[in-house]
Image: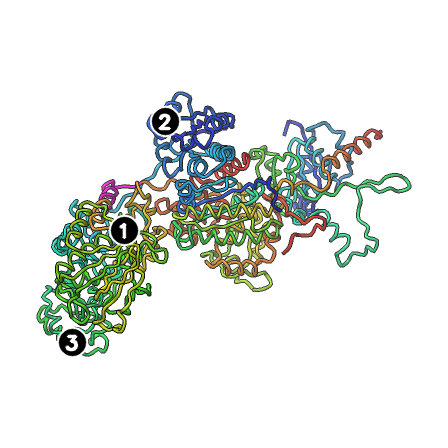
Amino acid sequence: MSDETFKPKIVAFLCNWCSYTASDLAGTARIKYSPRVRIIRVMCSGRVDPSFVLKAFALGADGVLVAGCHPGDCHYIEQNYKTMRRDVMLRYFLEQMGIEPGRLRLVWASAAEGQYLAESINTFVADVRTLGPLNWSDVLHDGVRREEAFEEIAAEHAEAMEVQP
Amino acid sequence: MITSDEELRIGVYVCHCGSNIAGAIDVEALTKFAEQLPHVALARHYKYMCADPGQELVKRDIVEFGLNRIVVAACSPNLHEPTFRRAAEDAGLNRFLVQIANIREQVAWVTEDKQEALEKAEAHLAAAVRRVAQHEPLQRQFVRIVPRAMVVGGGIAGIQAALTLADAGREVILVEREPSIGGHMAMFDKTFPTLDCAACILTPKMTAVKLHSNIKMLTYSTVESVEGSVGNFRVKVRRKPRYIDENLCVGCMQCIDGCVFTKAKFPNAFDQGLGLRKPVWIPFPQAVPPVPVVDPEVCLQITRGKCKQGCVEACGERNAFRFDQQEKIEEYEVGAIIVATGFQAFDPSVIPYYGYGKYPNVYTSLEVERLLNAGGPTGGKLVLRDGSTPKRVGIVHCVGSRDANYHVYCSRVCCMYALKLAHLVREKTDAEVYNCYIDIRAPGKGFEEFYNRVQNEGVRFIRGKVADVTPVAGQGTTAEGGLVMQVDDTLLGKIRQINVDMVILAVALEPRADANEVRREFGISCSAEGFFLEKHPKLAPVNTANDGVLLAGACQAAKDIPDTVAQADAAAAKALMLIDAGQIELEPNTAWVDEKMCSGCKTCIALCPYQAIRADEERKIAVIDQALCKGCGTCVAACPSGAAKQHLFADQQVNEELEGLMNYV
Amino acid sequence: MSGEPKGKLALYWAASCGGCEIAVLAINEKILDVDALFDIVFWPVAVDAKVHDVEKMADGSIDVCLFNGGIRTSEQEYMARLLRKKSKVLVAFGSCAHEGCIPGLANATNRRGVFQTAYHETPSTENPEGVEPQPKTQVAEGTLHLPVFYDTVRTLDQTVSVDYYLPGCPPEADRIWDAITAIVGNTLPPPGSVIGAETTVCEECPRKRNEKKVKKFYRTWEIIPDEETCLLEQGLLCCGIATRAGCGARCPQVGSPCIGCYGPNEGAHDHGARMMAALSSMIDSTDPEEIDRIIRDGIPDPVGTFYRFGLAASHLRRAKTADGNGSLAKK
């Protein structure tokens, strides 16, 4: 699905020391990349609670990007390995929830890799575009018309009340 | 402290940053958008928020309109977050009730379409407004700084930094991996462009290091591990055994004469392998400390356990030999660390067409430095492998530099040292010298003048990259064989073959082979080419991302001696600044544990690389040491009970930011 | 409570198993105290009162309604709204009303998937004509109505506003009594609160805990756990670390890992996310492939493991199902 009008909503969690700095560097170097990605700064990718990711999807994100320092290069020594583990776990879980694991992306970008981060963002946006909208609020819509069903029952009860002595 | 939503009064400031932001984002529309956000009491836009009038605006509004939260939509928080925090504090507002929306680096500068830019800026601004509503006032916290610095690397950068700090009256621990300090500079004969004798200007400094009461010099030692953080580093140093007691040795060198090996037969690494040494040896005559070292790989006493020990006999009643010396680990506490680990010369044997390693009379510049040096293997005589004096010498510039196959960067010093070598070769041998260059880079003080001087001395310059170096037909690869440099002379517009009997490759300066392991140990980053990464290329050239770890010299980028010395002094000044402050502010964004929610499950304990989390067995809770916590928040994200929380990155703060972002996407 | 001698109490049962009804009786003889304090105006399982009796009551005339069960059908939604209107205090009683519980786990599929399994696929089903319940069925006498069966189970507070929550599957008798005491003694926490502990099961678990680093996860039948040590540290998927205390750590005490029936701790919204965050963090590997293997080998069903009770209340609330077949999106 590559709907031209589809504007993906993507949230990116960037770690302060590497990937957020890389995004600043992309800016300084005036490297243009897709504006569809909105950025949240965390001190370390290790702070990215799986519940942030799930909440982002629930709020309507079509994709979530988490970026940290390269493995072995974490500003906090080894915390990005925890990010790596959570990423594996989350993708496994998302798969079971019917969400394409490709909607969650983990990127390692050093503070010097502004260009690379911008490219990674563009690639991810393109990939999410291919996957199409997720629109979680639609997923929550019931196949049956809840309101109508409720009104019907309420009406039945009201009718029943009328015939009560 | 603000307790209910109704009392929230958020001030929003949109910065134009001249035209940097205003040129890409409709700042008026953004301000209007901000005005209608919940709890926003006022929204303004201004030309330069970071300038004094911009800051004054914030301060005045805080007082006048009773603002209790501030959002500044401007450049990256990594630049001006401290500025606006301070402005808020000046106006009596807690400094942590400020949030920055990054609309310059992350929006204005990276977005083509103005409408898209506005939408993204709105999202980031809305997120910041929702986030700041959740901020709480925090107290700043401080810890004591250990008033001592460590300098790692005893080249000219390390020596200079150590002396500056020591002269300022501070304790310094200088760690050097080699048996002597001095580094690359000690290998050189002369220095450009003044042609000072390297030893003449360096050895007094080396001696000063040894004599300085504030400097503890640890040679033949490497840094094993670094723990702790700015102000309180704990560094373990691995001290290799010299097998000679440094305190007892007087540097008479008689042991070297006394060694049972009557002839030197092992290559001396300091001489680039051109000279030979014995199992007990000293890298060069002016070594500091002037204490020989025993090579355990080849010393008979150590390898076989029996030897006549001519060395010990020569040492006599000094009795400095200690064949039972063991490697040991020593731990030092320091407040700041200056990394000055230098560079290595590019190994040109990986470039097949220059024939280094194949044709004996192809040399690296560093080898020639040793040949020219009076203390070197030939006593300062420039000779070919067969002992004859070269008559025609070719110098190839940019070997490994400015070459997409090796290093893209310019090594900055090669042009100048090649000119110096050309001068020295002519001075010592009267040989014809051909400099084959891409272009001559001589932008330093006195450099262009030196270039002119060398040109006037009759050194020939050929603008073009040397394509290959081959033996003269029929002469094979023997030591006396002549060589042909093939070069595309771009000024004449033709290919030239130049017969020479010596080729000097002006090799690149590159990051040391172990730079990657070293930087990990010090918690710093490398830039793309592998040199250590400074915190900011212009404004923080000696700082690193790891506070308290500073850079000096060629480990940060290829540079010459004057720049190295200047940077070393800058690093020393930064270290001094830290130490003299006496205390340092802790990260405000530390993690903490809500005691009543913690069940003591111990999920977090093993997750902290700083051992900041301790299990309180009695109370069955986890306790986070605020001085050790670096504020990454990993334990907070992992805490299954939700008891671990992070200042400035609380769940509800991030969640609100997320809601803000998504609402306005 | 006002000055009236007896309060009015209602209990109701929506999408749940009935265990909560029994749990009310598990307070044993104290049920007599409850009877002394309250008139039970509505409790279909125990007292003969009809829906229209409730409909006739004045709004807000029921003092306390203990509502168990999630909202799966239109009829349950009607009752939830009705009892909300009639009650001063509405308590989401037990895991189903609180967070969807096992019925909510069906949010991993949809109505179609549930019907397919229940009316066609289970081994005990004999349904050659493929009959499925219909909201409306024409018979000679007229139209028969069944409530509409929704795709998604909702928690009580996703349907109506809820004053208090009493977690557990079912809530422990002591906790029920605590709640009743709080109601009677007017010592209830602020509305919207969960009545219960603010910490997790480990608080009540006597097992010894050390460092948590796990190289392999086991399912309960794969190992016989050591009696003293934390089950999770032995690789068993014990949800006690992320689950609200209040049960007395019954399961881990007898060597069975906590399955999480008390839901997430105070302030945590997504029970499964808390478990996933903690568990993945403690995996002792830095190799993505090995990590993947450890997770897939040890946790064949992450939704069932981490969201057994809390799927309906989680951020995502349900799975996205492939259209039409209602089956779980599978690889």
Q: Position of residue B199 (x, y in %)?
A: 13, 56
Q: Position of residue B640 (x, y in %)?
A: 51, 48
* Residue depicted at 83% across the width and 29% down the height: A162
Q: Is residue C67 above or below residue A46?
A: above
Q: Chain of mark 1?
A: B
Measured in 3D between alpha carbons, the distance from the residue under mark 1 to the one under mark 2, in whole angstroms, is 47 Å
Q: Nearer the viewer, mark 3 or mark 1?
A: 1
Q: Are marks 1 and 2 on the same chain?
A: yes
Residue B439 badge: 1
Residue B54 badge: 2
- Toward which corner of the image does residue A157 lie, by quadrant? top right
Residue lying at the far top of the rendered structure: B64
Q: Main secondary structure of the magenta part?
A: helix
Using the image as rendered, state which of residue C26 and residue B250 is in the foreground: B250
Give the residue type that dot 3 points to. Answer: Phe
Quadrant in which the C terminus of chain B is drawn? top right
Give the residue type that dot 2 points to. Answer: Gly
Q: Position of residue C260 (x, y in %)?
A: 58, 50
Quadrant in which the N terminus of chain B is drawn? top left
Q: Which residue is mark 3?
A: B261
Measured in 3D between alpha carbons, the distance from the residue under mark 3 to the one under mark 1, in whole angstroms, is 49 Å
Mark 1 neighbour class, 10 Å CA radius: few under 14, some 14 to 19, many 20 or more: few
Q: Earlier in the sequence, mark 1 or mark 2?
A: 2
Q: Earlier in the sequence, mark 3 or mark 1?
A: 3
Q: Are marks 3 and 1 in contact (CB under 8 Å)?
A: no
* Residue depicted at 15% across the width and 58% down the height: B424
SS of the residue under disc 1? loop
Q: Position of residue C22 (x, y in %)?
A: 69, 46
Give the residue type that dot 1 points to. Answer: Asp
